[in-house]
Image: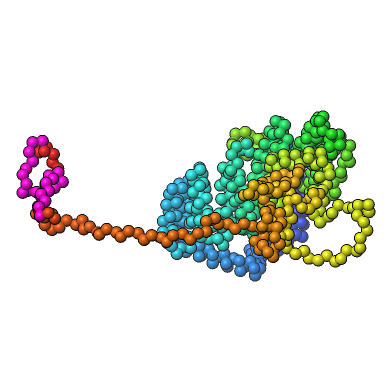
Amino acid sequence: MNHRRSFFPSLRAGTLAAVAVAALIVTSAGAQVTGSTQTTTDANGQPQQTVTLSTTTSKKDKKKEDKVVQSKDTRKRMQADKKNDAVAAADAKLPDRILYDKALAATKKGHFDVARLDLQTLLNTYPDSQYQMKAKLAIADSWYREGGSAALTQAEQEYKDFITFFPNAPEAAEAQMRVGDIYFRQMDKPDRDYSKALHAQEEYRLMLQQFPDSTLVPQAKQRLREVQEVLATREADIASYYASRENWPATIARYQTVADTYPQFSHMDDVLVALGDAYESEARIVRAQKQLPEDAKARLEKIYDDRAAAAYRKVALEHSASPHVEDARDRLAAMNLPIPTPTPDQAAASAAMENSRGQYSLQSRAMLMVLRRPDVVMAAHSGEPPMTDASPTLAPTVTRQIMQDYKDAMNPAAAAAATQPAGATPATTATDQPAAAPAAPAQPAAPLALQDIPSSGAGDAGSGAAVMTNVPSSNGSAAPASGGANSMGVEVLTPGANGSASRQPAAADPTGGLKAVGPTNTATPPPIEKPAAAPDAMNDVVASEQAKGQPQTTANGKKTPKPAFDKDDESSSTHKKKKGLKKINPF
């Protein structure tokens, strides 16, 4: 049987080659198709040919495809970049730029002393250089990167100087941010010294106030939230310590300070629940006191129960997404009070706040165990941090408030009178006052004069005016003191109340009963005697004759002897030499 010999070893190979050729012809008419045939052996040992086809694009078509049409803005930006590169290449050869680059390289390698020496050389040698500002900032950065207490203190001073010299530069915000970071790096745990945290809070607030348009504002706000997290943790820990000692006024003061000053605290739900528990403890103390009347005890219990319920309601409304909101709801239910439902806005705000907080990881827990740094993992990442501190609540203030609550509960009438408006007067019935004519229009009150002040015994005792006791006068008489009033030891000088002279009318006694102040002896004193004449001045200057050693004649005609020569004080070659032990003395 005769077989026709074909170019392809099998029908399948021929079909595949035909399909490939047709596809290449359809896809690109301008492409060149090249093929290669390769003979291989299949698994049965039969020869098999494989056809490989490839397309080759012409150089003209390839150049057309690679051509990119640039827009006008792109060409303009490329020209500006090319110009800036040329300027930068020219500046790189300047000596001040060489010093600056050398200093930056030394800083990266940790050679801070060498870097600062180069930067200081640049500042002193090239006062008009364009790298003056950058060099001064680089000096501060080198101190900051070096670390240590002394280096960070020097870095703070350098940053402050930079802000003083360049307040409008964009780098001034970065310098102020670095000052806050200096204190942030030195912050300790909440149970240690918190002065660095207070300084960091102050510097970050200053940065946000002075540079509100800086790109570092979000970073500064986050650092401020973390610092306030540390301060709030400290206050809450102190309050917990006082609660363990059952010092409820101090506990209430600390928890109230946290609630007023740090609203973004991560454990605010625990703080408010503990604040309510402190008020409930005060209510239990009231219930345990048997000497209090029942009505006063009931009023005190209501006061503290209301304050505790207010703290619990705040948790249920403003912190509905917090982990311990159920504790507040359970306490409200135990007090037989309705549980409030938060509004959608309150629920959304609480959920956003809780979702923005970080979560603990194995790495963060290990770093907290090894490093001496505060725990700021749970700090919020959203919301505006408070820029001012609220007035702190002090324990003495809480104690005085509790004492006032007891007084008001024991004497509710006095408390009601104290809370009554100043212009209000107690109501009178028809039996107390007879019917009177309509009152005339009120006239403006004239200022009181000295004669208008009533005496201590005048007026109605129930008028509510303060009554003071008159002290005895110089003649031994005293005005009667009102009974039952607190004596202040003050004499009220009133016309017609003190002495016989004061009984005269105001026109006859212009002094109003006041005694004249002055000496009782009004006689004219004798004239002042003239001082005695001063003795004649004596001339103590030694005369020239006495200076020469000549004797001086006295009044009786005798000559005064010549003064002896003191060899200890004077020296002369005309006198005899020293003898004996005096020779030893060189003076």
Residue 158 % position (x, y): 50, 53
Quarter of the image for residue 497 reads: bottom right
One can see residue 472 in this view:
yes
Q: Quadrant of residue 577?
A: top left
Closer-to-camera residue (373/100): 373
Q: Nearer the viewer, residue 140 or 363?
A: 140
Residue at image location 80% in from the left, 54% down from the top: 422
Most foreground residue, 101 or 417: 417
128 with respect to 325 (left or right): left
**Count of labels shown?**
0
Q: Which colouring convention does the figure follow?
A: rainbow
Membership of 572 in magenta stretch: yes
Find out whether residue 291 is within the magenta segment.
Answer: no
Q: Position of residue 213 (x, y in %)?
A: 64, 59
Q: Is residue 263 left or right of residue 301?
A: left
Range drawn in magenta:
557-581
Which residue sits at x=50%, y=59%?
Answer: 523
Quadrant including the N terminus = top right
Q: Main secondary structure of the magenta part?
A: loop
Q: Give the quarter of the figure containing the C terminus.
A: top left
Above or below 467: residue 190 = above
Would residue 307 be seen by someone viewing this image from the given angle?
no
**Residue at the spot x=45%, y=46% of the render?**
111
* Residue 25: percent from left, percent from top: 75, 59
State the residue in front, 107 or 90: 107
Residue 64 screen position, x and y as percent: 66, 65
Seen at 81% across and 45% down, the residue is: 415
